[in-house]
Amino acid sequence: MPAALSGLVERLRGALSVLVREAIKFGVVGAVAFVVDVGVMNLLRHTVMEDKPTTAKVVSASVATVVAWVGNRSWTFRHRRNRAVHHEALLFFVTNGIALLIGAGCIAFSHYVLDLRSLAADNVANIIGIGLGTLFRFWAYRQFVFTREILAEEAEHSSPLADRP
């Protein structure tokens, strides 16, 4: 294999390795945030916000966003930090605000437009909204929030679960 092609293959392999590592870590942090989001929403729907599923979603997603901020900043994308923390936090919370609107919109659509008012229907809409919001967040975090490019040698020598800065 010519040296130029070999170098290109190695760079692609390294970039793919970084993407896989980030996706796995993002998934772990997201799973924790998911449990927080669904748990808080259901707790609120069973208690003080029994008739307010959209408000319960906004509160639960806000709590889950704080959990996700800590996990993604300190673990998933810590090797990509390149901004002052306040700027990065602002971008992170704006991104999550948009994802929250996606999730709350799914619940509001299901609950108020389709008139599916059961707790089970709210949970199905919540999970659909979380899924759509998650796809948006992963893309937006890599594009706008945690944007620092990875050094080629760092990408080459990392395993998918490596915890390197």
Image: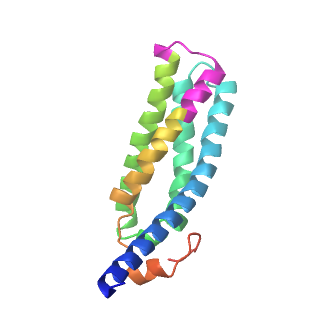
Q: Is residue 47 visible?
A: no
Q: Position of residue 94 (x, y in %)?
A: 37, 47
Residue 148 among those drawn in magenta: no
**At which x and y percent is residue 37?**
60, 41
76 above or below 47?
below
Is any part of residue 156 visible from this angle? yes
Q: Residue at x 65, y 23 (%)?
A: 120
Residue 130: x and y, percent?
A: 52, 39
Q: Quadrant of residue 34?
A: top right
Quadrant for residue 97, please give it: top left
The magenta span reads 112-127
Q: Residue at x 49, y 70 (%)?
A: 17
Left or right: 18 with respect to 35? left
Residue at (63% x, 51% y) in the render: 32
Quarter that holds the N terminus:
bottom left
The residue positioned 51% from the left and 40% from the top of the image is: 131
Which residue appears farthest toward the top when viewing the image?
Answer: 115
For residue 123, side relative to residue 165 (left or right)? right
Query: Where residue 56 appears, x then y in whole percent?
Result: 57, 30
